[in-house]
Image (cartoon, rainbow, N blue to C red):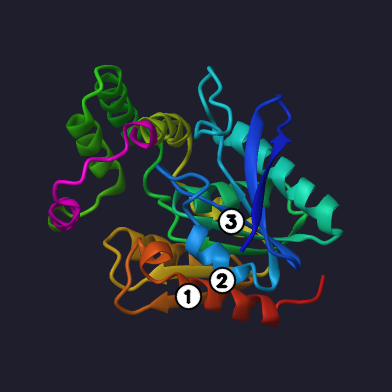
Amino acid sequence: MNSHDQSVESADGTRLVVRRLGIGDPVVLVHGSGGGLHSWAAVAEHLARDHEVWLPARRGYGPSDVPADTKSFRTETADLIAVTEAARRSSGRPVHLVGASYGATLALHTTSADPRDVRSLAIFEPPLYAAGAEIVPLLDRYRAAFERDDAAAMAAALNEVTRVPAEIVAAMAAGAGNRVPDPVEARRSAVGWLHDLEALAQDSTDITRWSSITVPTLLLAGADTWEPMPTTMNALARTIPAVRRVTWPGQSHFVTMTAPTLVADALRQFYAASPAA
């Protein structure tokens, strides 16, 4: 399906590149850490048959701007508000906001701060446990590894942030085999992770703050994702008033890549049941 890229300017002048495809009610898909314009591509192709899909590259991730200052959820919330405003202006309709992983945390922040352009919210496994003081030493370790371009040390620090079990890390490494990542993409991802860790280190693990969210909300999860994600999702489900849940057996934190049709179908069903704009 045809797509085109455009720029959206945030409140502080940061230029965000957004990929658009499809026609219909607008859906904004927010990528997680280490991602970019490509992260939601498979899901977007399915949704674009009957929705206008917006895929922003978050600040810190090329081809969007990489600001020189320290990133926070406050600045990134302003970014996402700029994108949702642009999507609403273009279509004349409020947006369905969707976030995965770190992008889900950002979607929570944005909907809590300014829900005016948000028709519904879909959240896939936000790492709400990975925030605050305990992230600071991991950020410092990662920054030191980043500055000496030590990929193994960067990955080790990130595994502590995400708490991916060692056996899954080993399985992913084995699956990659001898494939060498594209150096440009690897550096782009590394830069983005650094900025995301800065924001996480300033954030809170308080889940009760999301009780102010009143738009229809869908919580998405893989049944095989490791702790503390299941406990976190249960706590979030108890906190947000208007919530529905979908949990996929046999899937984990990588479902947007491993089973994009499941994700697209769940979103479509949710939108069909949501109140009209």
| Left or right position of 257 against 224 | right
Q: Across the whole image, how many numbered discs are drawn on residues?
A: 3
Residue occupied by mark 3: 29
Residue flagged by tag 2: what amino acid is it? Answer: His
In the image, which residues are magenta?
168-186
Q: First in sequence: mark 3 or mark 1? A: 3
Tag 3, which secondary structure? strand
| Left or right position of 43 against 120 | left
Q: First in sequence: mark 2 or mark 3? A: 3
Which residue appears at 64% of the width and 44% of the height? 18
Tag 1, which secondary structure? helix
Which residue appears at 37% of the width and 44% of the height? 130
Q: Position of residue 207 (x, y in %)?
A: 49, 53
Residue flagged by tag 1: what amino acid is it? Answer: Thr
Which residue appears at 55% of the width and 46% of the height? 106
Up/down of 68 relative to 131, above or below: above
Between the residue at mark 3 and the residue at mark 1, the CA separation in whole angstroms equals 15 Å
Q: Mark 1 and mark 2 in contact? Answer it, CB < 8 Å.
A: yes
| Left or right position of 104 against 274 | left
- In the rendered view of the protein, which quadrant contains the N terminus? bottom right
From the viewer's perspective, is the residue at label 3 or at label 1 nearer? 1
Tag 2, which secondary structure? helix
